Amino acid sequence: MSSDLTDARWPLVEGSATPPRLRSDAKRFSRWHLANEASVAWHRKLGFIEEPDLFNAQLYLRAAKQELWRLAQLGELTESRREPLLRSSEQWQREVTRLEALLDTGDKAAAFACHRFAS
């Protein structure tokens, strides 16, 4: 196990099982608040992967569209800012459409992570 994961900066990892990114057979679940960037970064560093979720995809889509609008209103929407936001918006629109189609078929578990992992 990498020593950077067991020092005092990572108290939740110390004493726990080997983190997912260091085990090929592990399937671990965790939760984080989407607005807590430090927590998101921490989870990603440990190898957690976000599960597909319609609510999150809709949130990411709205955030990309909002940022496009905000920068345009401020007159700060340069081509270098516009292109990545358009790509992100298009990506999240495709994901929202895909997950909505699954929901339309009645497959709540495929559309919402909370239905897949409900106890």
Image (spheres, rainbow, N blue to C red):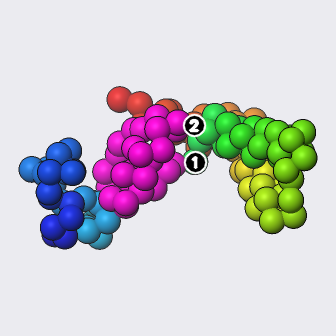
> Residue at (48%, 44%) from the top-left corner?
37
> Residue 65, can we see it?
no
For the C terminus, the image quarter is top left
Q: Amino acid at mark 1?
A: Pro
Mark 2 — residue? Answer: 112
Where are the magenta residues, as a range?
Answer: 27-51
Which disc, if any, is residue 52?
Answer: 1
- Magenta segment: does it hold 74? no
Q: Nearer the viewer, residue 100 or 61?
A: 61
Secondary structure of the residue carrying numbered label 1: loop
> Residue at (21%, 64%) from the top-left corner?
4
Mark 1–mark 2 CB contact (< 8 Å): no
> Residue 8, can we see it?
yes
Look at the picture and state if 37 lies above or below 24.
above
**Mark 2 or mark 1, which is nearer the start of the sequence?**
1
Q: How many marks?
A: 2
Question: In the figure, residue 60 lies in which quadrant?
Answer: top right
| Mark 1 → mark 2, Cα distance in angstroms | 7 Å
- Magenta segment: does it hold 36? yes
Left or right: 41 with respect to 12? right
| Callout 1 crowding tier (Cα within 10 Å): few <14, some 14–19, many ≥20 | some
Q: Amino acid at mark 2?
A: Phe
For the N terminus, the image quarter is bottom left
Which disc, if any, is residue 107?
Answer: none
Question: In the figure, residue 45 lies in which quadrant?
Answer: bottom left
Left or right: 34 with respect to 38? right
